[in-house]
Image: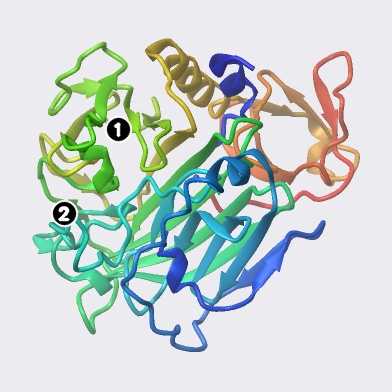
Amino acid sequence: MRMTQRFHLLAAVSCALCCHTSLLGAVVPVTDANVQHGLSPYKRVCQARTATSQPPAQPDDRPTIAATRELSWRQTDTSVALLNHGRMVWEHVHDKRIGKPYMRFGLLDGTELTRPWPVPKDYPRNDHSWHRALWWSWKAINGVNYWEGNQTGTEPVRATIATKPDGSAQIDVAIAYHRPGESPVVLEKRRVTVSAPDADGAYFIGWETSFTPSGQDDVRFDRNSYGGFALRMAAECCGDAGRKIPAWTFGNSEGHADINNRAARWVSYQGTASNGQAACVAIFDHPDNPGHPALWQTRSHYPYLNPSLTCKEDYVLPSGQTLRLRYGVMVSAGPLDANAVEQRWKAFAGASAAAVRVNESFAGGCIGARLRVNVTPLIEPGFWWCRTSDGTVVATVARPWGIASPPSGDGSYQTVGICQPTVW
């Protein structure tokens, strides 16, 4: 299948990881049932985590692992990971004891693309120890440093996990921002969705989040060139001159090679992974985000990507209002040209903004309501947003349980089951 076709087939989904070796607990084979865990409040302190990185796969077994699927879930009170043949594909960590939730991810054969966290002492690029693979961190809130300092002040207070047999998942996390021992100043609701790996091993991470002041005062997210949604990649991305492996290269939607401090809809980063195969990662900035297209911070001497919301000025969030942001991360087990990435960004930007008309029967109850779909709203794996004509989110409908398929001739769908009010 062509690469561009593959990403047209990937659902335009709107979706933070710890080391594979530190995950303690039994492997949970994938079944037909959803697995959901409510973790509020946290009832016990997580097991100690090691600082060792995932052991590299043997060269002769990686092709076999990548070509076959033996998916399973490994889950604890503070993390969830998708495994293939027992090796980490991705992992999300939401550990109250260590603060900021984060995500590690890689390829189906177990090759990790992000830098592990905690960073092993002997890791080739062990600078900036507060960089947590794929994560969110404001640089400063009301003058208080949340980037290098106050790590536990970004506190995951509640997490709900839903996993599926095909390897897709949804992770909802409530996060409180506060000084040690003080009340929160900002509350965040974050939804991370991960699509099932496609036939070529590619998948998509959707990241949708909202921030609301917790008190009566406005909140200031201080101006800084970097901060917010950030990605720290593996040391191998810097290349290896001795083995004649070149460093990974950046690209963006505007065709620039030198992309630091430039505005773009998306930024790609691709090259040779540690398994010797080509790979590509791209981050998407959603057109509804304030300041779109984002100004990007990138580094090549320590592989780093960051669409920065506060690059030029403070962002002041008035009391009683909510800041909503959406990003996407595309993980490809192979190279992608600019056109392929652009098409995937358009799918992400267009489908996630799809409006759904709900007729009068919806108000009378979920079952039997008809939903008129203007654009196929494959926003995230397993869940469709239901919106009124003005775009207001009024409900979520779970699929395949909630919507009968295929649609009727007029483009509407008949709801047959689950329909719950949404808080997003």
Image coordinates of residue 340 in percent, x first then y, are: 47, 15
Image coordinates of residue 216 in percent, x first then y, are: 27, 64
Q: Residue at x 52, y 78 (%)?
A: 24
Q: Which residue is mark 2?
A: 139
Q: Residues within 10 Å of mark 2 (few under 14, many from 20)?
A: many
Q: What kind of element bears circle 1?
A: loop
On screen, 5 above or below 281?
above
Picture quadrant where residue 327 is located: top left
Judging depth in this view, the residue of 23 and 219 nearest the camera is 23
Judging depth in this view, the residue of 127 and 325 nearest the camera is 127
Q: Label 1 near label 2: C-beta < 8 Å?
A: no
Q: Residue at x 82, y 56 (%)?
A: 32
Q: Which residue is mark 1?
A: 290
Specify the quadrant that holds the N terminus. Answer: top right
Image coordinates of residue 29 in percent, x first then y, are: 73, 64
Amino acid type, callout 2: Lys
Q: What kind of element bears circle 2?
A: loop
What's the mark number on residue 200? none
Q: Residue at x 42, y 38 (%)?
A: 326
Picture quadrant where residue 372 is located: top right
Nearest to the eye among marks 2 and 1: give it: 2
Its colouring scheme is: rainbow
On screen, 34 above or below 234?
below
Q: Residues within 10 Å of mark 1 (few under 14, many from 20)?
A: some
Question: How far, Cα to Cα, is label 2 from label 1?
Answer: 17 Å
User: Does 309 sit left or right of 347 as displayed?
Assistant: left
User: Does 52 sit left or right of 148 as displayed?
Assistant: right
